[in-house]
Amino acid sequence: MDKKYHLVVTGFSKPDSKQEKECIGAINALQAANIEYAITFIDRCPEFVNFFKNHADENFATSLMTGLSIPMVFEYIGSDFAKMKFLGGYSELVSTLSPD
């Protein structure tokens, strides 16, 4: 089964910031690996993150206590898109995609 990801990012209003570079980097990494993904921009509705509380695994709930960074990367579990596993941020995505 092919993996599918969901990225939660911010808009690109500050292209030189670390956060924006990591959002673009996550998109580029998935495109380079030819992996399917969905994107949610939360600039105008940051509370939309609460949606993921109902669809992600317990790792996401734990990460809420320690603080979240953008981009947030979720891996879909199964093909029905009803459940996701919280992978982490940009570094975790790059590490997961690395062939090493």
Image (cartoon, rainbow, N blue to C red):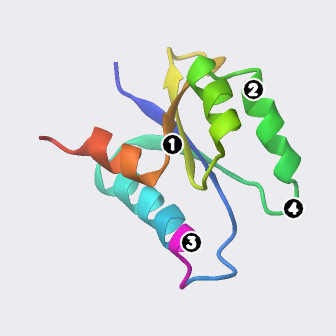
**Is residue 42 shown left or right of residue 22?**
right
Residue that extends furthest to the left in the rendered view of this protein? 100
Q: Earlier in the sequence, mark 3 or mark 2?
A: 3
Q: Given this view, does label 1 or label 3 mark the residue nearer the observer? A: 3
Q: Mark 4 points at which residue?
A: 44
**Residue 47 image position (x, y, % from top left):** 87, 46
Which residue occupies 51% across, 18% down?
77
Q: Earlier in the sequence, mark 3 or mark 4?
A: 3
Residue 30 visible in image: yes
| Few, some or many residues within 10 Å of mark 3 (<14, 14–19, 20+) | some
Q: What range is drawn magenta here?
A: 16-20
Image quadrant for the N terminus? top left
Answer yes or no: do the residues labelled 1 and 2 have beta carbons within 8 Å?
A: no
Q: Does the magenta stretch include residue 19?
A: yes
Q: What element carries label 2?
A: helix
Which residue occupies 77% across, 41% down?
49
Q: Is mark 1 on a helix, strand or loop?
A: strand
Q: Given this view, does label 4 or label 1 mark the residue nearer the observer? A: 4
68 up-or-down from 84: above or below: below
Q: Which of 92 and 5 is in front in this view?
A: 92
Q: Mark 2 points at which residue?
A: 53
How far apart marks 4 and 1 lie (CA) works out to: 21 Å
Q: Given this view, does label 1 or label 2 mark the residue nearer the observer? A: 2
